[in-house]
Image (cartoon, rainbow, N blue to C red):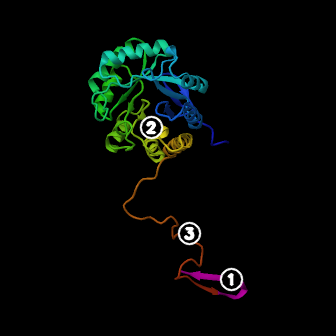
Amino acid sequence: MSYNKPEKDFTLYGETFSSRFLLGTALYASPQLMRDSIIQSRSDIVTLGLRRQNPANRDGDAIWQYIQESGCRLLPNTAGCKSVKEAVTLAEMSREIFNTDWIKLEVVGDDYNLQPDPFGLVEASEILIKKGFKVLPYCTDDLILCKRLLDVGCEVLMPWGSPIGTGQGLLNRYNLRTLRERIKDVPMIIDAGLGAPSQATEAMEMGFDGILLNTAVAKAHNPPLMAEAFADAIDAGRKAYKAGLMQKRQTASPSTPTIGQPFGTSSKTHCIQESGGVLRCAI
């Protein structure tokens, strides 16, 4: 039996994927670096923004060509939208241009930390779902917000680890653990704020289903190598979660118990050679 086969149980809106790593396509120093990073990430889904990339207008032909060649599912986003109307309009344009009803929904509520607007996000999600979109909402780690998003029909949640592009990792572990414990049967993808592969591993060990990021790879000194590092970290975290982490303890516990130790391992062991070569020991 092989224990290294990729999982086939990562399902989003009825579509199954092998990779739990979703990678963004912005901020790379060159289209070639973006292409190599996608390959090394082993991702099945890549995100892209209509504001930056519009194939109909022949903007960034090389970028668009590499994205198409990757064979990954396209996940357009509404990055930069500050109102419900703006987000809905951009989603409809993305569906027409990229020929997909999948959308990473972003509605910015604050210019300083780019925190999602919870009220606008719920309203826009409800509108888009009624229009047939498969909405993946970028949200905060607030439990009530996530429940409202589920109420209007979202089948995936994408809470942040920390504000986008900061690299701060998982700032509110309590909220994130609460989300995972209270909402068990809905795919949850940590989206934004991760800066190191170890942070991705920690999120996966908590039981989250996937990781979406961009800046941590695109701004690395070697983006393709960093993409590979994140892919490995995500796989390791998932395996650890499925294996079951040991419980933390306040006191030490020996990994080698004294009961059952071979004779001669204790300083208090006394052995006597008897006739016939019999060795008798007492502790």
Compared with 244, 111 (above or below) is above
Q: Callout 2 environment at 10 Å: few (<14), some (14 to 19), or many (20+)?
A: many
Q: Nearer the viewer, residue 48 or 251?
A: 48
Q: Callout 1 environment at 10 Å: few (<14), some (14 to 19), or many (20+)?
A: few
Q: Nearer the viewer, residue 16 or 185?
A: 16
Indicate the position of residue 25 as horizontal and vertical percent values.
49, 30
Q: Nearer the viewer, residue 252 or 111?
A: 111
Q: Nearer the viewer, mark 3 or mark 2?
A: 2
Residue bearing the label numbered 2: 215
Residue bearing the label numbered 1: 278
Residue bearing the label numbered 3: 260
Spatial CA span between label 3 and label 2: 53 Å
Dot 1 or dot 3: first in sequence order is: 3
Dot 3 or dot 2: first in sequence order is: 2
Compared with 260, 270 (above or below) is below
Q: Are marks 2 and 1 in contact (CB under 8 Å)?
A: no
Q: Nearer the viewer, mark 1 or mark 3?
A: 3
Q: Nearer the viewer, mark 2 or mark 1?
A: 2
- Residue 99 visible in image: no
